[in-house]
Image (cartoon, grey):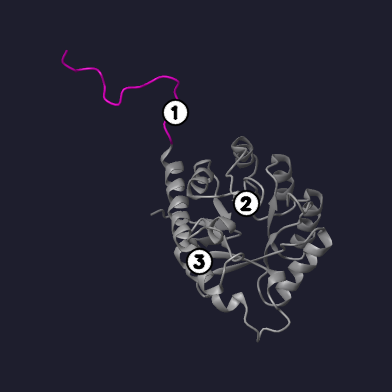
């Protein structure tokens, strides 16, 4: 539909949707949902992969790595040192030198620890990683992460897994205007309309996991998200009409016989 793929660190992805691999009832269901999503990049938690014994069944056995680009993530890390070490382990295991960087600051809200996130970003960029940090919707922190070398900035739309959609669209817009690297909304999406809103705001992409894996029918929801991201991108490129307080006739009044 749209010949303007998402460019991340020089790599072009046809789809602007990035999907996760956790919370599915089975690996087979995950595989089917990934296919229907149309995504080119999937994120995997390094800590969920048995990198010491690859002979055991793993979610990697159900991901066609010739079809999908792997984006390892540091889910479950609560300080910069753990996140850095987890990223290093993923690279040593041959997963990727890309990383979705997560440094969580609170177990209840799962909000990012932005100080630790910034520290880990600086270290990993110096080590040659392509860093995509998950952060809050703070334009100042977004700029700092870009200045630290992040290849994209991934602000939350709402708390992880909440499914309540983008709660502060104004901040997302400001982030989009503040930085020049891609902006990818990460966390908070609950249904297709939330993904479309993110794209209509001008975001470069959307990352989600729970909204698909936790749906009653993950495969259908994955397909819906595929269409929603594409539709939202088309709407953004087309340009919406101005909002008005009063009515405006769809047909011109001039020339109407009275």
Work out whether 216 lies above or below 179.
below
**Disc 2 or 3, which lies upstream in sequence?**
3
Q: How many angstroms separate mark 3 from mark 1 (CA)?
A: 36 Å
Q: Residue at x 80, y 68 (%)?
A: 85
Classify mark 2: helix, strand or loop.
loop
Which of labels 1 and 2 is toward the front? 2
Read off the residue under disc 2.
Answer: 187
Left/right placement of residue 3 relative to residue 171 reads left
In the displayed image of the protein, which residue is found farthest to the left? 257
Read off the residue under disc 3.
Answer: 34
Work out whether 53 lies above or below 213.
below
Q: Which stretch did the figure color magenta?
A: 240-258
**Disc 1 or 2, which lies upstream in sequence?**
2
Q: Nearer the viewer, residue 119 or 10?
A: 119
How many circles with numbers are drawn on the protein? 3
Report if residue 241 lies within the magenta region: yes
- The C terminus is located in which quarter? top left
Q: Residue at x 57, y 65 (%)?
A: 42
Q: What is the magenta segment's predominant secondary structure?
A: loop
Quadrant in the picture for residue 198: top right
Q: Nearer the viewer, residue 93 or 193?
A: 193
């Amino acid at each position: 539909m749209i010949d303007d793929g998402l460019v991340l660190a020089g790599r072009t992805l046809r789809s602007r949707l990035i999907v996760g691999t956790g919370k599915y009832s089975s690996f087979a269901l995950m595989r089917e949902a990934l296919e229907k999503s149309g995504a080119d990049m999937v994120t995997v938690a390094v800590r969920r992969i048995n990198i010491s014994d690859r002979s055991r069944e793993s979610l990697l056995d159900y991901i066609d790595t010739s079809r999908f680009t792997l984006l390892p993530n540091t889910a479950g890390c609560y300080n910069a040192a753990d996140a850095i070490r987890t990223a290093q382990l993923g690279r040593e295991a041959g997963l990727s030198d890309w990383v979705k960087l997560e440094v969580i600051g609170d177990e209840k809200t799962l909000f990012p620890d932005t100080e630790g996130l910034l520290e880990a970003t600086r270290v990993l960029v110096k080590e040659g990683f392509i860093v995509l940090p998950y952060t809050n919707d703070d334009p100042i922190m977004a700029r700092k992460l870009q200045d630290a070398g992040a290849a994209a900035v991934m602000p939350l739309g709402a708390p992880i897994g909440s499914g309540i959609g983008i709660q502060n669209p104004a901040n997302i817009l400001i982030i989009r205007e503040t930085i020049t690297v891609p902006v990818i909304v990460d966390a908070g999406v609950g249904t297709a309309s939330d993904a479309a809103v993110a794209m209509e705001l001008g975001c470069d992409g959307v990352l989600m996991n729970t909204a698909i894996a936790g749906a009653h029918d993950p495969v259908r929801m994955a397909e819906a998200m595929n269409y929603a991201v594409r539709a939202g991108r088309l709407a953004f490129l087309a340009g919406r009409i101005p909002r008005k307080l009063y009515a405006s006739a769809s047909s011109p009044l001039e020339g109407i016989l009275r």
